[in-house]
Image (cartoon, rainbow, N blue to C red):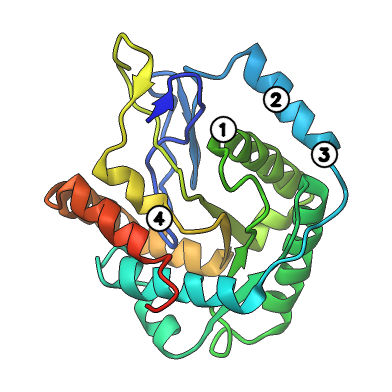
Amino acid sequence: MHSSGEYTRERLGFLSAINVAQPLVNGCRTGRRVCYSRSRWNLATTKRAAKVMIESQSSLPVDVPHCEALTRRWVRDFVLALQLCPYARAPFLANQVRIAVDGATSIQQVERALEREAQVLQHAPEEALATTLLVLPNFHPRDFERFYASTLLLERRWEARGLSDSFVLVFFHPMHMYAKHGAPANGCIPVDQLDYERRAPLPTINLLRDDQVDAAVASGKSTEMLEHNAAHLSTIPLEALEIRFRCLYKTDA
């Protein structure tokens, strides 16, 4: 359960799920790829977003093999097993998905890691490297509100530097929650099945090539995937999804 003060992204995509441009609807500013819920964006969030800009500049050590294995289990046993992203299977099985682990704790460190991985993608042929999952185990793993505020700043700075013309960023978090309209009177927003569409065992940023994004939008497959995920996940009991997700953390998997 999360308090209604958290500022979650509207449900619009997953991994390679990219969104067609839409007008302003119900207070949400939608773009070609992302939509933010503005209903819970207030002064407190703005202050918190500003705070993440001056975090510690010291990265923390990480267990790279463990993080890589955990991320691979997530793609294999969750994303592919639940058929949440039809674009992921072929490159994953062909070993064309790069998993990069970084100990970043601040936005500045994450930006440097993103720039590094963007250069790797840019200089690699698509048939050898389709996409990258940047895994950030130390970047607010237990604080989705702070992670979400950080993603807003990261995206704005990414776009301001013109990098969004080449690569699109998609964010995942262990405690991800989509914005839900009509929060209950007790101020708590319940988790539902669709939240697991953007949950990963560790904070993760997926770097997608822009031409892949354009192709998905033009074909209409991204919309089909969104509809499929919403319908498919709703048929799975929430407890079953929770158990499947927790099982990803088992080291003997």
Q: How many marks?
A: 4
Disc nearer the start of the sequence (2/1): 2
**Kind of residue at disc 1:** Glu
Crowding at dot 2, Cα within 10 Å, few <14 / some 14-19 / many 20+, comes out as: some
Marks 1 and 4, Cα distance to the nearest angstrom? 19 Å
Q: For this rendering, which residue is in front, 214 or 202?
A: 202
Disc nearer the start of the sequence (2/4): 4
Crowding at dot 4, Cα within 10 Å, few <14 / some 14-19 / many 20+, comes out as: many
The numbered disc on residue 145 is: 1
Disc nearer the start of the sequence (4/3): 4
**Kind of residue at disc 3:** Glu
Marks 2 and 1, Cα distance to the nearest angstrom? 9 Å
Residues at circles 3 and 2 in contact by the CB criterion of under 8 Å: no
Above or below — where is 189 with respect to 88?
above
Residues at circles 2 and 4 in contact by the CB criterion of under 8 Å: no
| Residue located 67% across and 50% down the image | 139
Disc nearer the start of the sequence (1/4): 4
State the residue position of label 2.
Answer: 48
Please identify, in this view, whether the residue under mark 4 or under mark 3 is nearer the observer: 3
Residue 132: x and y in percent read 59, 72
State the residue position of label 4.
Answer: 14
Q: For this rendering, which residue is in front, 253 or 220?
A: 253
Residue 219: x and y in percent read 33, 64
Marks 2 and 4, Cα distance to the nearest angstrom? 26 Å
Above or below — where is 227 with respect to 185?
below
| Residue located 38% across and 14% down the image | 187
Q: For this rendering, which residue is in front, 124 or 66?
A: 66
Residue 207 in view, yes or no: yes
Residue 225 placement: quadrant = bottom left
